Image (spheres, grey):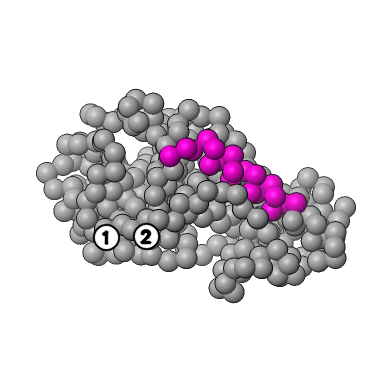
Amino acid sequence: MSDIPFITDHEPEYGRLVTVAPGVRRVTAENPGPFTFTGTGTYILGEGSVAVIDPGPDLPDHIAALHRALDGERVAAILITHTHRDHVSAARPLQALRGGPAACPIYGFGAHGAGADAGIDPDDPVEEGADRGFAPDRLLADGEAVEGESWSVEAVHTPGHTANHLCFSYREGDGGRGVLFTGDHVMGWSTSVISPPDGDMAAYLASLAKLKARPERIYYPTHGAPIEDAPAFVAAYIAHRRAREAQILAAVEAGAETIPEMVDRIYTHIPAGLKPAAGRSVLAHLVMLAAEGRVVAAEGRASARARYRPR
């Protein structure tokens, strides 16, 4: 179904400091997997006094590699795109090694679930992998800036994958045209999992449209390779989601009542181990479609266990 030009050729050098662009360096954690691709890429902006974006998982080897990479430099800010453990759990250990909260505060939108209200059954299981004990030292709202000696970033609130997801626009990147660090909101190797209630498909599509209208042409996701023609890539992302929406509506109209039935009809070429994640994405679409009055949940409210019918 997808016409997204995925970028799957990416072989990181685990634990090594790599320059990816002027003013942008990366250390990749050795945590590859079906949802992290080749691992979490932690970015370092500037020189001397730097910002760290997404410190990554709480793995001793990765934290030690980051500490080595930052030798002789001062960490002025730690920036968090969202509160999944593969992005945020190394934040406090790294901060402790670099002088504590006063020296290098952690910035983010808020704790996990901040702003989430997908309107589904609260007894539904939520996505795994959230660091529910984490809270940033300083809150960032949409459009707020964080500045260092040789770098400045703008926080761009992009709810959808999580309610507290931020992208960061690095104003000095791409020769002054700016680049965007997109966390898990837009990735080059795969679509993003949207898992209610914290994941919200309507919010996700609105956030994609928001990015499409921005000027940045180069994206740096936390997992995988850079995206060089970002506006076209985002347009393909949106088209993919709308095509998936049409498939779900067609499945419901053809008599599929439950999410497992829809997943089996639609996701015919994915491994069985990925079907639960596909089911969460289908649920996210159904929550949106029910809110728009385009499908009906027989139990009155969209949930993972509900039965659905056409409006």
* Magenta segment includes 242: yes
Q: Which mark is drawn over residue 191?
A: none
Position of residue 163 measured from the top left corner of the image (x, y, whole percent): 55, 47
Task: Give the number of marks.
Answer: 2
Instruction: Name the side, left or right, on which 147 lies relative to 2.
Output: left
Amino acid at dot 2: Gly
Q: Secondary structure at mark 1?
A: loop
Instruction: Name the side, left or right, on which 2 lies relative to 97.
Output: right
The answer to which of marks 2 and 1 sits earlier in the sequence is 1
Name the one closer to the observer, 254 or 89: 254
* Magenta segment includes 245: yes
Position of residue 229 measured from the top left corner of the image (x, y, whole percent): 47, 37
Check disc 1: other Cα within 10 Å, few if <14, some if 14-19, many if 20+: many
Position of residue 131 measured from the top left corner of the image (x, y, whole percent): 43, 59
Residue shown at the point (85%, 65%) measured from the top left: 255
Instruction: Name the side, left or right, on which 242 lies relative to 228.
Output: right
Residue 159 is drawn in which quadrant?
Answer: top right
Residue shown at the point (22%, 55%) measured from the top left: 16
Residue 129 in the image: above or below residue 162: below
**Residue 175 visible to the viewer:** yes
Residue 258 is drawn in which quadrant?
Answer: bottom right
Q: Main secondary structure of the magenta part?
A: helix
Name the one closer to the observer, 34 or 163: 34
| Residue annotated with mark 2 | 39
Q: Secondary structure at mark 2?
A: loop
Residue 200 in the image: above or below residue 61: above
Q: Which residues are magenta?
A: 228-246
Contact? badges 2 and 1 (CB < 8 Å): yes
**Residue 90 visible to the viewer:** no
Question: What is the C-alpha distance between the residues marked 2 and 1?
Answer: 8 Å
Amino acid at dot 1: Tyr
| Residue annotated with mark 1 | 14
